Amino acid sequence: MIQDIPSLKEVYRDYFPIGTAVSADAVSKSPDKELIAKHFNTLTPENAMKFQPIHPEDGVYNFEHADRIVEFALQNGMRVVGHTLIWHQQTPDWVFKDANGKLVSREVLLERMEEHIKTVVGRYRGKVYGWDVVNEAIADSPPYDLRDTMWRRIIGDDYIEWAFKFAHEADPEAELYYNDYNTETPGKREAIYNLVKGLKEKGIRIDAVGMQSHINIYYPSIQEVENSIKKFASLGIKVNISELDMDVYKWDDREDRYRGGVPDDILQLQADRYGELFGLYRRYKDVIGRVTFWGYYDGGSWLNNFPVKGRTNYPLLFDRQFKPKPAFWSVVNFDL
């Protein structure tokens, strides 16, 4: 079945790379690894390179899962995007505390940041094409200031600059990205624009904004997505669609209404939305660095556990049997 349909990466060869987020387990078993190899030319480790899994204790690194993903990508001629170096979540408490449980100084935390970034980025130098250096640093509500995180509290607002500097020093050839969600919200879009503009004005390397694009079949409008692409591209950088999926539920809907299956009209609405979205991306192919789905089939999506644990969701192009959904055909069937 996997071999009988068009390849996403081939269909979009003249537009932009097509990626997916994976685990080490995904690239080690069938039919997952065959589907991944057929359709994608960029891989993002979904969790394996986050701080907690890769650096759980001071002086202790666990590279096994990340190494497996990178090895699979290189064997299959794929690029790897490292995700993520600095984030307020999935960072172990030891990073911010001393042996007595007290918060460390700015100097100590900067040393720990530098050591972590240079160890992780240095290990994959020449193998990882680009890095989500800082993830989700902007607050979710007005006035959209920097998020109040331990990184910011201890180091100060310039923690973001230091993260990008350390990453660039660790691998001067790697692309460096700022990554965030709700990038289609006007206020947050403006805040991200100003953050990246400020970094560039200080001479800090930043190659793209990652628009995560965890959207749903009702929101946001295609117009707001376009507004964000144009706004970020106006800074002279690329725009990565970095974590794309399309929830079949509205954000405030907490029912598990599709446990027994999703109606055809909902699947068609999703297909229409995906078709519109990729039509937009194709129009902006000159500024889109890549389009990465956050997962590759419905059964493996994080949305089956967020925001409602155990809810059955259908956000991707392949169903639980690895078969293409109507959304897949909307994405691959277009007039060249």
Image (tube, rainbow, N blue to C red):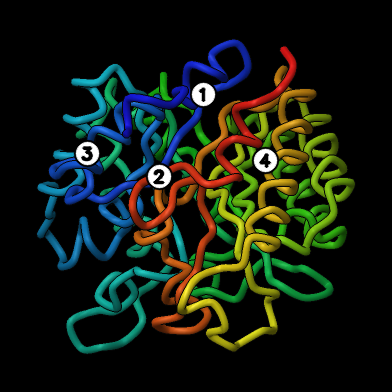
Residues at marks 4 and 1 touching, judged by CB atoms closer than 8 Å: no
Residue at 89% over, 46% down: 223
The residue wearing badge 3 is 69
Do the residues bearing badges 2 and 3 touch, measured as CB atoms within 8 Å?
Answer: no
Circle 1 residue: 17
Query: Where residue 92 sits: x, y (%)?
Result: 28, 73
Q: Assign a secondary structure to mark 4.
A: helix
Q: Is residue 170 above or below residue 137?
A: above
Distance between the alpha carbons at the discs numbered 1 and 3: 18 Å
Taking depth in this image into account, of 128 and 93 the one nearest to the observer is: 128
Marks 3/4: CA–CA distance: 31 Å
Horizontal side, residue 93 vs residue 285: left or right: left
| Residue under numbered circle 4 | 199
- Quarter occupied by residue 266: bottom right
Q: Does residue 12 appear to the left or right of 7 in the view shown?
A: right
The image position of residue 226, as x and y in percent, is 84, 40
What's under tag 2, amino acid-wise? Lys
Q: Is residue 280 above or below residue 321?
A: above
Relative to 154, does residue 22 appear above or below in the rendering?
Answer: above
Q: Which class describes the residues within 10 Å of circle 3: few (<14), some (14-19), or many (20+)?
A: many
Q: Are marks 2 and 4 in contact (CB under 8 Å)?
A: no
Look at the numbered disc 1 and give the secondary structure of its residue.
loop
Decide if residue 312 is on the left or right side of residue 206: left
